[in-house]
Each structure stands twice: as C-alpha cells, then as structure tokens.
Image (spheres, helix red, strand yellow):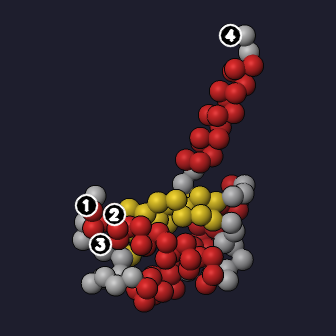
Amino acid sequence: MSLRGGRVAEAIKEEISDIIHHGIKDPRVGFASITAVEVSRDFRHAKVFVSVLGDEVQKADTIKGLESASGFIRSELGKRVRLHHTPEILFRLDESIEHSVRITRILREQEGNPR
C-alpha cells in the first residue's frame, strides 16, 4: 500500500469507528472495534475489519447491523473524508485478537506442564 493509501485507510478507520460508536442506533451492533481497513488502489472499495466482543450470534448480528447501516456509514464518511469517490464499504469479521488470546492461553497451559 502506498503512503497515501495508508493515510487514507487510517482516516477511514478513525472516521468509521467514530460513526459506529456515535451515529448508529441499531441494537444489533454490539461492542465493535475497527481493527484495520484495506483500500483498493483506486480508493473505490474499502474492506473494514471488525472485532466484536461476544458470542457467535452477537458477532453475526453486529456484522448484519453494520452491513444494513453501510449506506449511512458511507454517506457520513463522504462528508468527513474528502476523496474523489467515497469507497464502497465491505465489513469483515476480524477474529485475529481472539485467535491470539487462544494461542496465549494454550502456551500458558503448556508452561505449567512438565513436557
């Protein structure tokens, strides 16, 4: 990703995070954190990775709620980030934090074993 692409991705990440926390009233959207944003070279598409605190149902509901609100989020994003085209937003569940926690737990359990 180019330097400009990185700056655009970071700006999109900050703004979408703010929009989700302060502008969305959908009860399906639980405790969600934007972990990363990948933008296409032409800035027409943005893949937004979301980490959700909760069980599988809560995660699925949050993604559905975000997808449902994507038009509103895109509209707000267009007002806040000046680009020639406001990108289409694609939400993806990011489970890397949970994966990391699982690995850490397994390693700690192994440390306690004499093997």
Of labels 3 and 2, earlier in sequence is: 2
Three-letter amino acid code at the position of disc 2: Gly
Three-letter amino acid code at the position of disc 3: Phe
Q: Give the secondary structure at mark 4.
A: loop
Disc number placed over residue 43 in the picture, else none: 3
Three-letter amino acid code at the position of disc 4: Arg
Residue beneath label 2, please?
6
- Tag 1 and tag 2, C-beta contact below 8 Å: yes
Cα distance between the residues tagged 3 and 4: 51 Å
Q: Is residue 36 above or below residue 74?
A: above
User: Where, by quadrant of the figure, is residue 34 drawn?
Assistant: bottom right
Tell whether 1 sits left or right of 78: left
Residue at (27% x, 62% y) in the render = 3
Residue at (63% x, 76% y) in the render = 21
Residue beneath label 4, please?
115
Of labels 1 and 3, earlier in sequence is: 1
Three-letter amino acid code at the position of disc 1: Ser
